Image (cartoon, rainbow, N blue to C red):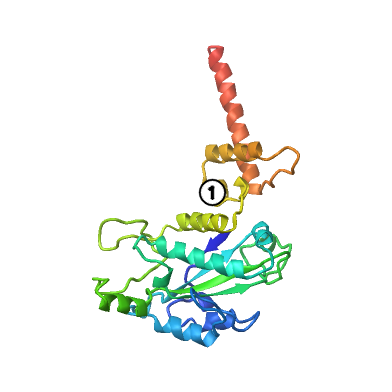
Amino acid sequence: MVAKIPRSGKGLSQRTGSCAGLVAYLEKEVPGQWFSLDRQDVPAAHVVATLDGNKRNLNRAADKYYQVILAPSQAELRHLGSDPEPLRAYTRAAMEEYAANFGKGIAGRDLVYFAKVEHARTTGPQDRAVQVGEVKRGQPKEGEQTHVHVLVSRTENLARYRERTQAGELKRKNPYHLSPLTNHKDTQRGVVRGGFERKQYSERVEQAFDQLFGYERPLVETFRYAYTMQHGTLEECAALRKQVLAEQPSTLPQPPITEHQQVIEQVIEQAQAVEQKHRRARGLGY
């Protein structure tokens, strides 16, 4: 399971204005069929009006909304089957984790978000095949590519905030502004409290999938494995690789090794050879 929160940029990646452009783009497969926490088949016009209207005390240059992309692996999609309803249920669970991850005591009902399932993806500049010239950018990707786009307001649900304030449940003068791109991570002191730990969110949405659907995830499919192999030390990568090989039955094909992992293992082998040579030398008194 990949959970991405793209940063703001130019064109459709711009988040400081209306979400109308991105919503129109996401209508490209099938018009409508947006859903939220408690609604199905929401029309695009309602998505735009609701998200654009849910903002308060944000300056012109501030992000007004964010996009969360939930992309199950092909193994996870096979586990779910062809019925789209489980994926909608999972999206709602992932957005509960999104709310909880801010550390402010809020839940999914305190957010304003709309989501849409897409079934096709095209190659982009980050794909290895595009970078080496094997395929052109914008080509359809092979295999099952179902994924979910979620558009979520930066401001907490203003209607619910007003109701809770009037009922005396909240003492805050202003609604929360919730940015998953903040550099704060579980901050306990200062003006900003809480934050958003993106690594933790990726782990939590993965765990939510496994618990919701009883998915027995192999170590090689975990976020921890992918993150360690990309960012871990040589020792951490080697230990995790050994654990994967130990858990993989010898009768089954071994998990594929990426170029990055091959380089890591070669460096580890060279380091071990040098260390053995030094030990032998010390043993002989050199």
Residue 78 occupies quadrant: bottom right
Q: Look at the image and tell me whether residue 208 can be seen.
A: yes
Residue 11 vs residue 159, the one in the foreground = 159
Query: Residue 169: where, in percent of width, then height?
Result: 27, 71
Query: Residue 172: where, in percent of width, then height?
Result: 25, 71
Instruction: Residue under label 1, please give it.
Output: 224
Instruction: State the residue at coordinates (45%, 65%).
Output: 96
Kindly give the residue lying farthest to the right in the view shown.
Answer: 251
Question: The residue tagged with tag 1: helix, strand or loop?
Answer: helix
Query: Residue 120: where, in percent of width, then height?
Result: 67, 71
| Count of marks, rendered view | 1
Where 279 falls versus 106 (above or below)? Answer: above
Kindly give the residue lying farthest to the top in the view shown.
Answer: 285
Instruction: State the residue at coordinates (59%, 54%).
Output: 214
Q: In which quarter of the image is the C terminus?
A: top right
Q: How many neighbours does mark 1 have within 10 angstroms: few (below 14), some (14-19), or many (20 or more)?
A: some
Instruction: Say which amino acid is labelled 1.
Output: Arg
Instruction: State the residue at coordinates (59%, 22%).
Output: 277
Residue 98 vs residue 17, the one in the foreground = 98
Kindly give the residue lying farthest to the front in the view shown.
Answer: 167
Left or right of 232 on screen, residue 154 = left
Left or right of 187 on screen, residue 286 = right
Residue 107 vs residue 167, the one in the foreground = 167
Residue 127 occupies quadrant: bottom right
Residue 65 occupies quadrant: bottom left
Q: Quadrant of the N terminus?
A: bottom right
Q: Look at the image and tell me whether residue 57 can be seen.
A: no
